[in-house]
Image: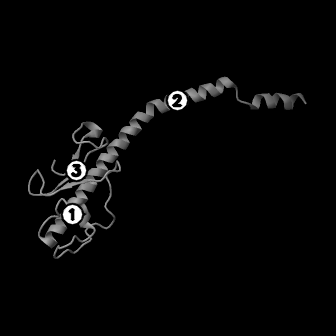
Amino acid sequence: MHRSRRRARQAGVTLIEMLVVVTIIALFATLVAPNLFRQTDKARVTAAQAQISNFEVALMQYKLATGVFPTTEQGLQALRVRPPNVENWDGPYLKKELPNDPWGRPYVYKYPGDHGDEPDIISYGADGQPGGEGINADIVNWK
């Protein structure tokens, strides 16, 4: 009978042991979380750059078929749906629906662009506002 009581007392976890474990987990989370969030931000920027690159390829295919880039009013949607009064449209030029940027906002499309003979494609980054630095910097196709 004494042996079973002794085993029952030894089988439990003390409050101090629990506090030590919780403290270790909190320290680990404090050290690892910032690095993890930075990697997520970098991944979103890379994804936006890749999507803009895909738009550029699709826009070149559109131009080869029609002779012109879509207007600002037609937008990137012209890569999926034939705009009215466009001859030789041979799309869709994107296999999937037009994605939003990694922050959930539509890409900005402008043609004629302000940076040469090709269209401007812009994601305004994490803050959704023109300009910014770091994670809030604009992601564009002309840089």
**What x and y, as percent, mark residue 36?**
41, 39
> What is the C-alpha distance between the residues marked 2 and 1?
51 Å
**What x and y, as percent, mark residue 104?**
35, 50
Q: How is the image coloured?
A: one colour
Q: Amino acid at mark 1?
A: Gln
Is there a contact, CB below 8 Å, between mark 3 and mark 2? no
For image coordinates 24% across by 61% down, the residue present is 76
> Which residue occupies the extreme left position in the image?
116
Q: Amino acid at mark 2?
A: Ala
For image coordinates 19% across by 63% down, the residue present is 59
Q: Amino acid at mark 3?
A: Ile
Res. 97 image quadrant = bottom left
User: Does 125 sit above or below residue 7?
Assistant: below
User: Does 7 sit above or below residue 39?
Assistant: above
Of mark 1 and mark 3, the one earlier in the sequence is 1
Of mark 3 and mark 2, the one earlier in the sequence is 2
Relative depth, front residue between 88 and 21: 88
Relative depth, front residue between 139 and 110: 110
> What is the C-alpha distance between the residues marked 1 and 3?
16 Å
For image coordinates 80% across by 31% down, the residue present is 8
**What x and y, as percent, mark residue 106?**
30, 53
Along the horizontal axis of the image, is 11 left or right of 42? right
Task: Provide the residue designation for mark 3.
Answer: 122
Label total for image: 3
Is there a contact, CB below 8 Å, between mark 1 and mark 3? no
Task: Provide the residue designation for mark 2.
Answer: 26
Of mark 2 and mark 1, the one earlier in the sequence is 2
Q: Find numbered disc 2 in the image and state the secondary structure of the residue it sits on.
A: helix
Disc marking residue 74: 1
Q: What crowding class fits label 3: few (fewer than 14 Cα within 10 Å), some (14-19), or many (20 or more)? A: many
Q: Find numbered disc 1 in the image and state the secondary structure of the residue it sits on.
A: loop
Q: What crowding class fits label 1: few (fewer than 14 Cα within 10 Å), some (14-19), or many (20 or more)? A: some
